[in-house]
Amino acid sequence: MTRNKKIVVVSLLIVVLLIAGPLLALKGASFGGSDDAGSVKVEEITGGEAEPWATPVLEQLIGGELPGEVESLFFCLQTALGVGVLAFGFGYLVARKKYGGDRSGTAGDKEKNS
């Protein structure tokens, strides 16, 4: 096994442990979202329910609440878009370093100035 394969295997094992560790260590725990935790905290402080300041645009357009599947779809699309932007940025930086990203002029301009 080459060195790169060992690094990949060890990295994957670490990721699996990071994912499974909390689930195994905290059996029966409820993993709620930040929206739920915020609502509970507002109720504790004010003694009443939290009222939203704005209504989501899509809920206004369809005249009701979005189904959970659609919310999950939008979340996945947002994640994919973010990962795509990050991957493009990292790829650009690697290519610039690999192929010499000097943008001060073209190769022909450098020869003329020499």
Image (tube, helix red, strand yellow):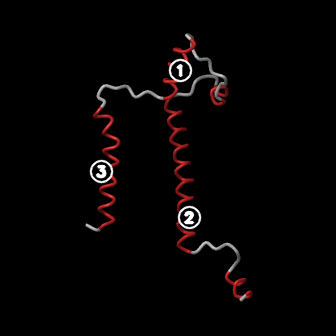
Placement of 39 over or under 9, stated as above or below = above
Placement of 113 over or under 2, stated as above or below = below
Q: Secondary structure at mark 1?
A: helix
Pointer 2 with pointer 1, Cβ within 8 A? no
Q: Circle 2 sits on which residue?
A: 93
> What's the distance in space between the residues labelled 3 and 2, CA to CA?
28 Å
Q: Is residue 21 left or right of residue 37?
A: left
Q: Circle 3 sits on which residue?
A: 13
Residue kind at label 2, given as amino acid type:
Leu
Q: Please report whichever mark, 2 or 1, sits nearer to the chain's N-terminal start.
A: 1
Q: Secondary structure at mark 2?
A: helix
* Residue 56 place in picture, x, y as percent: 64, 28
Q: Please report whichever mark, 3 or 1, sits nearer to the chain's N-terminal start.
A: 3
Residue kind at label 3, given as amino acid type:
Leu
Q: Circle 1 sits on which residue?
A: 39
Placement of 16 over or under 104, stated as above or below = above
* Residue 59 place in picture, x, y as percent: 63, 26
Residue at left 60%, top 22%?
64
- Indicate the quadrant containing the N terminus: top left, top right, bottom left or bottom right: bottom left
